[in-house]
Amino acid sequence: MLNHVSPSHLFQTKKILFVVLSLNLGVSVLKGGWGYWTGFISMQADGLHSFLDAGSTVVGLVGVWIASHPPDDTHPYGHRKFETIASFCIAFFLFIGCYEILKGSYGRFRDGATTEVNLGSFVIMFVSLGTNYFVAQWEQKEGIHLKSEVLVADAGHTRSDIWADISVIIGLVAFQIGFPIFDPIAAIVIVGIIGKAGVHIFMESSKVLTDYSRIDPKEIEVLALGIEGIHACHAIRTRGSLNHVYVDLHIHVPAEMSLEKAHCLSHRVESEIIKKFPDVLEVVIHLEPHLPHLEHD
C-alpha cells in the first residue's frame, strides 16, 4: 500500500498555516492602511505583498487539507500533488502582486503624489520586519521537519517579505533626507524580490507536476549492481517532490533463482535505495530473468 502524509504532520502544518495567516493579515492591514493614509507607494506595495501572503496561505491550507486524504480508488497514488498545485497557485498570487505594484509605481512616476512620513511609518515597518523574520525562520524549520512543500514555499515567500520591508525602510529614510524618488524605486525593487520568489516556486512546482527526474539514474544503477545476485539494471525512473520521491526500475536476476529468493533480493534493493536516498517514499521493482545468451543474439 502506498504511503501518504502522516495525519499528525498535516495537523501541525495546518496549525502553522493558521498562525501565519493571522500574522500576515495583521501586518497587511497595518502597512497597507498606513501606506494609503500617508500616500507612501512602497508601503502600500508592501502591504499588498503581505495581503497576497495571506491569500496564498489560504490556498496552502486548502491544498494541505486535500493532500491529507489517503489513497483511494480514484487517486491510488494519494493526493500529494494537490499540495503542489497549491504551491503553484502561490506563485500565481505573487505574479499578480508584481503587476499591481508596477502599475502603482508607474502612476507615481507619471503623476507624483503628496506623501507623508512620520514615526508611525518606521514603527510599523520594523514590527513587520521582525514578524516576517520570525515567520520565515519558523516556517522553513517546520517545513523541513514535516516535509511540507507548502510550508517551504511559503517560507520562501515570507523571506521575500523581509527584503521588501528593508526596501521600504530605505525608502522612508531616503524620503526623510530629501529623496522622494526612492519611494517608487523601492516599490520596483519589491517587484523584483517578489518576482524572483514566484519564479523559484513556479519552477519547483512545475518539476513535480511534470514528473521531473529527481535522482540520477546512474547512481541507482551503480547501487543495484553492487548487490550480489543482480546482473543488470535498467529502465530507472524517478519522480515526485524533493521530499517525496518515487522510484521504479527493472533488475535482472539469475533465471534459475526461485521466486522467493528473487523477491527477497528485490526487498534488499528497495532497502538499500531508501537507505541511501532518505527522501524516497516508495520503490517499485520489476524482476526479469537474466538470460546471457539472448544478449549476443
Image: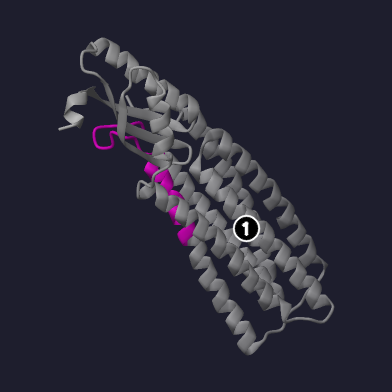
In the image, taking residue 12 as reference, residue 253 lies left or right, namely left
Number of on-image labels: 1
Q: Residue at x 72, y 74 (%)?
A: 38
Q: How is the image coloured?
A: one colour
The image position of residue 69, as x and y in percent, is 37, 34
- Is 89 inside the magenta-drawn segment? yes
Q: Residue at x 75, y 81 (%)?
A: 180
In the image, taking residue 185 as reference, residue 69 lies left or right, namely left
Residue nearest the viewer, comparing 49 with 29 = 49
Residue 4 in view = no
Q: Quadrant of the rendered structure where residue 197 is?
A: bottom right
Residue 117 in view = yes
In the image, taking residue 62 as reference, residue 127 lies left or right, namely right
> Is 91 drawn above or below residue 167 in the view shown?
above
Q: Residue at x 49, y 28 (%)?
A: 276
The segment highlighted magenta reads: 67-92
Rendered-image quadrant of the N terminus = top left
State the residue lying farthest toward the front. Answer: 296
Residue type, label 1: Ser
Rendered-image quadrant of the C terminus = top left
The image position of residue 129, as x and y in percent, is 72, 56
- Is 50 inside the magenta-drawn segment? no
Residue that mark 1 sits on: 160
